[in-house]
Amino acid sequence: MTTSRRSLLSRLLRTGALAGAALTVGLACAQAPKPIRLLVGFPPGGGTDAIARTLAEKLKDELGQPVVVENRPGAGGQIAAQALKASAPDGTTLFLTHDHTISILPQVVKNPGYEPARDFVAVGGFATFVNAFAVSGGTPARSFSEYVGWVKASGGGKGAVGIPAPASTPEFLVKLIGQKYQLDLVSAPYRGSAPMMADMLGNQISAGVASVQDFMENHKAGKVRVVGVLGTKRQAAMPDVPTFDEMGLKGFEDLPYYGIYAPTGTPQKFINDFSNALARVVAQPDVREHLTAMGLAVGHMSPQQLATREKAYTEAWTRIIKTSGFVAQ
């Protein structure tokens, strides 16, 4: 073989090797799973955001593909819910939320821009929780009865209570608590629990109602004091805090929930696979311990179980909202 022919053959082989390498890279890229966007309707730093990031990190390993938390804060989760509705039902976009966006908002907002029963499908639930009443560090009250006495003595019975979103479960709780204890309490709505907590820590507002997990860290640090929780059982993470059921405020036995939803039309196989991965994640001791420490009662719910809980909770709050006389805005 002449030198020129050997040179030509060498170039052809190199070209073929490069083409093969490029094809291999191209196939690998084509086969790489797309990231799953996990929408959260509240700002970074709040309880729901912290929960989503804990689960996303573990789900990534279980599913073998990236799970990225994407915050779409505003309107009590309404913006994130609208984003879910607008997403392709291909298993790349999910929504992690609690009861407010799914069961409450569609009843208190005339045109929320989505209809859960029509636009979403349940993927899986992972916890229930309770709402709590907390006072800021600058408030002298160390119990709920002391708070009631302090409001009557210093404010003539009038007081402002922070809530994470307008027309939310906490807003109705503020109203019912005020009626029960003969206080003129006004709800002060925020865009999520994080800015509400910032004002409580700065003593800009004396009290707030939100989920236990929103208060847990600062309660343990002594920066705010949880003085009452909803439900029929005291919380394991704060056993000294009485329930409002103990104090005579009845009718809140059906606990709010956390769940993950997909756009209607998402393939059933993806829903089943994701729900099974979620079940494995919440069964991990470190995850269960972490979420329990945040004030959640951890337990996996299948798509069917989550849908059933959602329906029952929505019906319960339909009655409460109707009784309150609230008119959808």
Image: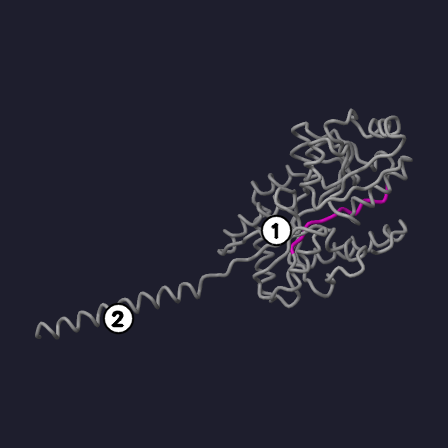
What's the magenta region?
250-260
Q: Nearer the viewer, residue 56 or 327?
A: 327
Looking at the rendering, in which quadrant would you find the N terminus?
Answer: bottom left
Residue situated furthest front in the rendering:
204
Query: Is residue 255 magenta-colored?
Result: yes
Q: Quadrant of residue 21?
A: bottom left
Q: Earlier in the sequence, mark 2 or mark 1?
A: 2
What is the count of numbered marks?
2
Q: Which residue is mark 2?
A: 16
- Check the image and report above or below for 168 versus 159: below
Label 1 sits on what residue type? Asn
- In the image, residue 201 sits, relative to residue 67, either above or below, namely above
Seen from the viewer's position, the closer of residues 276 and 90 is 90
Quick one: label 1, few (<14), some, or many (20+) residues within 10 Å? Answer: some
- Depth-wise, is mark 2 or mark 1 nearer the camera? 1
> Judging from the image, what secondary structure is the residue with disc 1 in?
strand
* Residue 55 % position (x, y): 58, 48
Q: Which residue is mark 1?
A: 71
Residue positioned 79% across, 47% down in the render: 169
Above or below for 66 versus 231: below
| Residue 121: x %, y % from top left | 68, 62
Residue type highlighted by circle 2: Gly
